[in-house]
Image: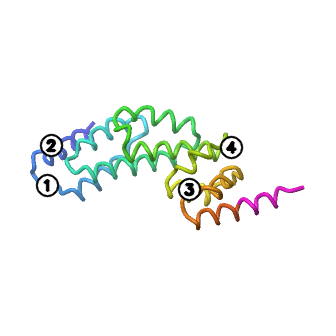
Amino acid sequence: MALRQDLERMLEAAEAGGGEPGTSARHRCYLTAMSAVPPTEDSWMIALVLRDPDRVAAESTVLAQVDHRASQLRSAASFAAWTATISELLDPGSFIMRRIEEWQLFKRVVEGGDVDAAALADSSNWLQRKVVEETTSVPALTAIGQAGRTRRLRNLARTKAGRLRQRNAP
């Protein structure tokens, strides 16, 4: 509870234009605080951070927490359950929501779920690169090999898919 009160006081000073602590210090403080709370407490932390007057700092902090939780919550189901607790706090068209959707797509690919080739083709360079680097899903690699955002990603995906097919050939 002391953490919450300290963060509230810091944010109130920022909202009042007190200037102290500065944006960078608040951002570091938010990141430190978020790393110390369990996933069940993320919603109040995210709501508080999104009140910060510096929108870029607030959103980058929340994005870092989304990435952190996505790496911690291994399954698509556990990540989806966590995102359900914070989604109402986020603008549906925001970059953060787009990242959440891409993490969900990535987790489905990793778990061997059906590959949505159109969604992969429309995804960011970040997701396409992550899929190429970290998965062994031939259907996902094939989709990126055909419609990846860059020539380099298409070539890497085709090469990796070809190696995986050869390795799995009878």
Say which amino acid is labelled 1.
Glu
According to the image, what is the colour scheme of the structure? Answer: rainbow
Q: Quadrant of residue 151?
A: bottom right
Query: Which one is closest to the eye, mark 3 or mark 2?
Result: 3
Q: Which residue is mark 1?
A: 20
Q: At 42% across and 40% down in the image, what residue appears? A: 38
CA neighbours of label 4 inside 10 A, class few (<14), some (14 to 19), many (20+): some
Q: Which residues are magenta?
A: 161-170
Residue 157: horizontal and vertical position, in percent? 65, 61
**CA–CA distance between discs 4 and 2?**
46 Å
Q: Which residue is mark 4?
A: 112
Q: Secondary structure at mark 2?
A: helix
Is 169 displayed left or right of 100 in the figure?
right
Disc on the earlier residue, 3 or 4 = 4
Circles 3 and 4: CB atoms closer than 8 Å: no
Q: Residue 12 has which mark?
A: 2
Q: At 38% across and 42% down in the image, what residue appears? A: 37
Disc on the earlier residue, 2 or 1 = 2
Tell me the quadrant of the picture where the N terminus can be found: top left
**CA–CA distance between discs 3 and 2?**
40 Å
Q: Quadrant of residue 107?
A: top right
Q: Which residue is mark 3?
A: 128
Q: At 28% across and 53% down in the image, what residue appears? A: 56
Circles 4 and 2: CB atoms closer than 8 Å: no
Of 43 and 125, nearer the camera is 125
